[in-house]
Amino acid sequence: MDIEKVKLELKKKVEKNINKYYAVDFLKQRGFERKTCKKCGARFWTKDPEREFCGEPDCVGGYSFIGKPVGKRLEYIESWNKFSEMFKSLGYTPIKRYPVVARWRDDTDFVQASIYDFQPHVVSGEVEPPANPLVVPQYCLRFNDIDNVGITGRHKTGFVMVGQHAFLPPKDFDQNLFLSHIHKWLTVGMKIPEEEISYIEKQWYGGGNLGVCMEAFVRGLEIENQVYMIYKVSDAGYEELPIRVLDMGMGLGRTVWVTQGSATQYESDYPDVIKKLFEKTGLELSDMFRDFMPFAGELNVEENKDIEKSWQKIAEKLSVSKEELKKEVMPLAALFSVADHSQSLLVALSDGMLPSNVGGGYNLRVIARRAMSFIDKYGWPFSLQEVAEWHAAYLRPLFPELNENIDDVMKILDIEKKKYRNARQRTKKMVVKILKKKRNISADELRLLYESYGITPELIREVAENTLNVNVSLPENFYALITRERPERKREVEKEFDLKGIAETEKLYYEDDVKEFDAEVLKEWEEKGKHYVVLDRTAFYPLGGGQASDKGKLDGAHVVAVIKQGNIVIHETDRKLGKKQVHGVIDWERRLQLTRQHTGAHILNGAAREILGNHIWQAGAEKNYEKARLDITHYEIPTAEEISRIEKLANEVIRKAIPIERRFMPRTEAEQKYGFRLYQGGAVPGKMIRVVNIKGFDVEACGGTHFSNTKYVEEIKIWKVKKIQDGVIRIEFSAGKEMIAKLMKRMKEEKDKEKAAWLKRVELLIAEKEMLTGKKERIDVEGKDLDSIIKIWKQLSKELEKEKKRKASELSEETVQIIDVADMKLMQEIARKVAKKKAYCVVLAPGQVIGVDNKSGKPVKEAVEKAAEIMGGKAGGKGNEWKGGGPEKNKYKEAFNQVRKILGE
Ligand SMILES: [Zn+2]
Ligand SMILES: [Zn+2]
């Protein structure tokens, strides 16, 4: 269904009965009055009898609080403390922020608003919220405005959104009450006079939900937006949500900025960091910059098509040249960008995302490089790491967890810096070369340069100005061009079977030791030559969670594959059952081995995190019968020493015989108890999630089969570690003593086989060389290992090549000749050499012949063909060269005589 149509429909509905949809009673009670904006036509509420405009900056002529703060001055962290205290007294529970990396969702990489914490399961009414009602200081990341960061005074990539949320049945949902709470915060907490506040009535749509909202503005600044979600929108249309959801979002920084009235929001958001940055760089807010700030919003690249023209206009208003203005503004804008980017990186890296070339990590790399290129360009005496550390220290009372992972974050940023430096070194020359040819680089070329080589526009500008002394024009919205929203992930549409009316399968595979079972056949069918069976209960584990499916028997039929569709397990059998009741037998040896591999993967994941750092997450896994693999997030290939420590720790955990708890838990309870590390394998569906807890070591939400104790894994052996993509490392391993022994034996056998093959090759070379030189070779290969043997082979090949060349130069210059070595390369060398001098040449050897004719006029081709025929074979060729041969090798002397005859010699 068309969302615009739905919105319009809702709008009509609202228009017919506006007082039902907005918190009218409370506002009336406070003496507010509903008005219509004279400029934009929006309906809004105000207590100021004089007010004619809604409060949007476009309608009221921009911000009017800069230099003229309103309310009681609040500091950043103080504001949250006061807010949460007040809301606690109002019956809300303040909760800790969720990680900014949204592991519990499969549709987004980062949290972009506080409501993201509760989507999809809480908002849909399926899962209980952690508290109700609640407030949360949620860190959010948005990468759609990078070009504006620093310039406009307010755009940021990372910020804290204060959320006020409630999830209630419609009858208990009291909009007037919720609005009265936020109104109390604005007027009592922030001490903003009621006359200063205007509430605008709007509609709201997001993430498949639709509702109405009330936005609060103070002096042109939007402070908060209180949304009341009512509908769920889908292709089928819209329907009322089973619960009503309160979604109030308020930028924490906005509450501070408006009460401080600073020139930019960066100063009020990061007071300590900005102070340090000013001290270190000697920069400060000049009068020109302060005069510029009220107009800075006009440089919003999202809304402005001709930025240069706007610069010109603003400069004229300030009576300076455009160049002077830019010279004043750009370094400060760069400094504010470094302040913003370093904080975003701190939180994202601390929460477990790595910069990379793919996915959400790509956007982190973009801002890291942008910040580093500013630091380089201006030669500032601090690093990105230092600034991140200052943020961590300042935010300690609000987000103490940022200090726990700080060493990890420093290391990651350090590696990122090295990668950036390397890219710069490699590419500086490339930029010079491009700029020598032309002064304009198209947006597409820039994008390519950035994505292939990490060349930022800042670097291009720097090289242009410093090395070539030219100015280049680059697009102002460059970062908007290169950052990507993650494309809607297409769910894999697997073949769906028609299972209407069939009950959920009872799953026996979560109980230990169910090797056999009896079940009733609910459905049996055949499709494209395959047989499928659905039972009322089963112990067959279906493919899932990276674990291969069980095998075994259903009566006389072999179970070849097992899959899950929704909550129904489907068995594929090799023949028709044709029965009502069946007896199932699991291939228990296979199941045990798969369980070893799977439990081993959990242990290995925990060990990797212990050894490599808290940024380690599972990025994928596959557990097959013989070998398994675990993909982890890490910025480089671990050293041999680290790998051996991981293996050692994993085996220690096995030896310690740690109990493994496996149970289903309500989602929210599990999240609160174990944190979001649970979601190692990504988002998991459902109200209840299965928690696999290796006590004190690793906890994951996982639906696979696991042992009750680590000791049953017996042993873990890592076979191979490699990088499979930027930021992702693959560990190939096996678990189980017998399996490891079997594979090691096989590997040894394979190695022995390989060695034998190489020995054979060496022997052949030795024989050939002896034939060529007539001397006995003395090469000792006895007892040598494979690598040494390959080395000998390489050496011999080289020597032989040389020997052939030497031999060719030594041989006579006869136009028809015979040699003992049947080596086509050598024969060719001789034939060509002689033909160069004497116009033609035919060389014969046991079983082989070649002829070259440089317009001699002689029947060389016929001679070669005849020779091959005599040896029982054929000849062919093109141009001036023919070769051939046959199985009757020793007839080559007879052929030699015949050739001479044909050529008249
Ligand atoms: Zn308006
Ligand atoms: Zn598992």
Image (cartoon, rainbow, N blue to C red):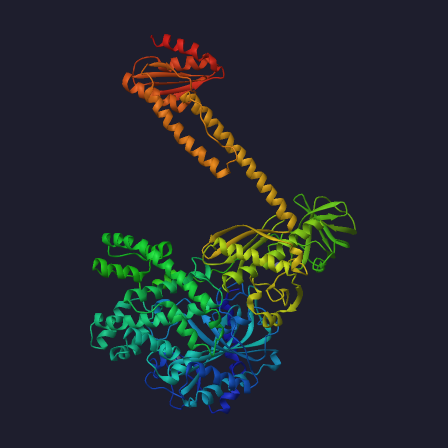
Q: Position of residue 859 (x, y in %)?
A: 35, 12
Examine the rendering and report whether any part of residue 870 can be seen. yes
Of 43 and 177, nearer the camera is 177
Image position of 61 (left or right of 351): left
Q: In which quarter of the image is residue 152?
A: bottom left
| Of 233 and 740, the residue lying toward us | 740
Q: Is residue 614 left or right of residue 531?
A: left
Q: Which residue is drawn at 50% across and 38% down?
A: 786
Residue shown at the point (30%, 62%) measured from the top left: 458
* Quadrant of the image containing the C terminus: top left
In the rendered image, residue 429, in percent from the top left (x then y), is placed at 28, 53
Left or right placement of residue 747 versus residue 198 in this view: right
Q: Is residue 95 above or below residue 848?
A: below
Please, is residue 377 above or below residue 801 in the view?
Answer: below
Q: In this view, does 320 lie to the left or right of 453?
A: left
* Residue at figure coordinates x 26%, y 67% from the top left: 308
Viewer can see residue 55: no
**Percent of width and height locating residue 88:** 54, 85
Quadrant in the rendering for residue 239: bottom right
Estimate the x, y position of residue 569 in percent, counting from the top left. Answer: 68, 55
- The quarter of the image that holds ligand 2 is bottom right
Q: Is residue 775 above or below residue 11?
A: above
The number of callouts visible is: 0
